[in-house]
Amino acid sequence: MNRYPLKAGLHPRNRFRAGYDFAALIADSPPLADFVAPNAYGGTSIDYANPDAVKALNQALLSLGYGLSHWDIPAGYLCPPVPGRSDYLHYLADLLAPGDAATIPRGPSVRVLDIGTGANCIYPLIGAREYGWSFVGTEIDPVALRWAQKNVAANPTVADLIACRAQPSPSDSLRGVIQPGERFDLTMCNPPFHASAADAAAGTRRKQRNLGGPRTADPGLNFGGKAGELWCPGGELAFVRRMITQSTALPRNCRWFTTLVSKSAHLPLLAAALRAAQATDVRIIEMAQGQKKSRILAWTFLGVEERGGSAG
């Protein structure tokens, strides 16, 4: 298993690596001004414990950074951090062109399956705009699916590159959505981390304390996320294990299967599952955003020539 070096910060191609230019963001998205104020470090920022502020910042980042000027989510649903989500896409681009950014494939011939795209549909929207890739986003929640479709339709520059599909089974990630003979270059997934609703609520309360926000009876009032976004039976480890098992039935349908893994302690167990599944190559790609650490787990059943990459 190859381990890439830990990055000190965001990916070099990340549009927000140098931080936020709030003046430019407000000039492009005036409603953001209501949430920006001086901070303790002599600069300006927002209150990250305020869900309205976080959503307004996301809307401004998507508009100024990617020209995605129409984006929204329903109350209570996950509001993802745009810079961190774009990093996943940049590292996947590197995976398709190891060691040579100049040869990163661009355009709609690169097909990506986003497992659990959410109401925000953030990965397809950014990936289609950044690299011109085509996406299929899957979702088990009918409300989230409708909002994902709404966000896609509201941005005509990428609407032709993104399709959204219902996943009929909550226990499936790949089964039921990949059509016969369909091929993808990549799958991507941000799996539910928690094993139960109670665990998810406790995690949200920890975030509230870390950000200095108020403790509320309903933690979702401060941080969005529904069942399926935040938790599932068995949590992250069980979800990714099921994904590995299902990938063995579709070994030639995808060049690289990938997923985020939040907890490093899960990696040895997942590596064992991939050895048992006889994956031909497994990669761990480390990511960092400030103090937050995460990693991408990627695997393939194809040989080097078949997947068009290096053994790196």
Image (spheres, rainbow, N blue to C red):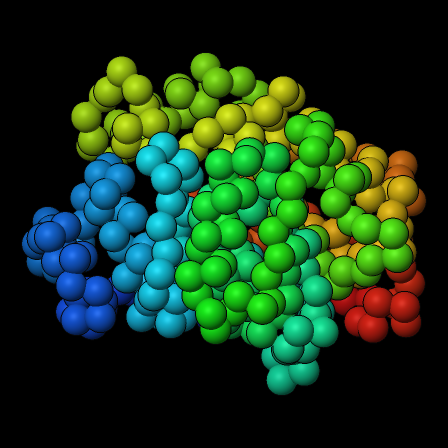
Please tell me which residue is depicted at 48% across the width and 73% down the height of the picture. Answer: 157
- Indicate left or right for 238 with 129 as reference: right
Residue 281 in the image: above or below residue 75: below
Residue 195 coordinates in the image, percent (x, y) = 57, 21
Compared to 159, does 121 lie above or below? above
User: Is residue 89 in view from this perspective?
Assistant: no
Q: Which of 41 and 136 lies nearest the eye of the viewer? A: 136
Residue 182 appears anywhere in the view: yes
Q: Is 49 placed left or right of 126 in the picture?
A: left
Residue closest to the far bottom: 102
Q: Quadrant of residue 59?
A: bottom left
* Residue in front for this viewpoint, 179 or 90: 179
Which quadrant holds the C terminus? bottom right
Q: Residue 17, percent across and down?
A: 37, 67
Q: Residue at x 71, y 30 (%)?
A: 169
Q: Position of residue 243 (x, y in %)?
A: 75, 38
For the residue pair 174 and 157, the one nearer the viewer reads as 157
Number of marks in the rendered image: 0
Q: Position of residue 40 (x, y in %)?
A: 10, 49
Above-or-below relation of 79 to 109: above
Q: Residue at coordinates 63% horizontally, 20% vertically from top-left?
A: 233
Quarter of the view holding residue 2: bottom right
Q: Is 251 situated left or right of 170 in this image?
A: right
Q: Residue at x 40, y 70 (%)?
A: 66
Picture layout, residue 109 above or below residue 266: below
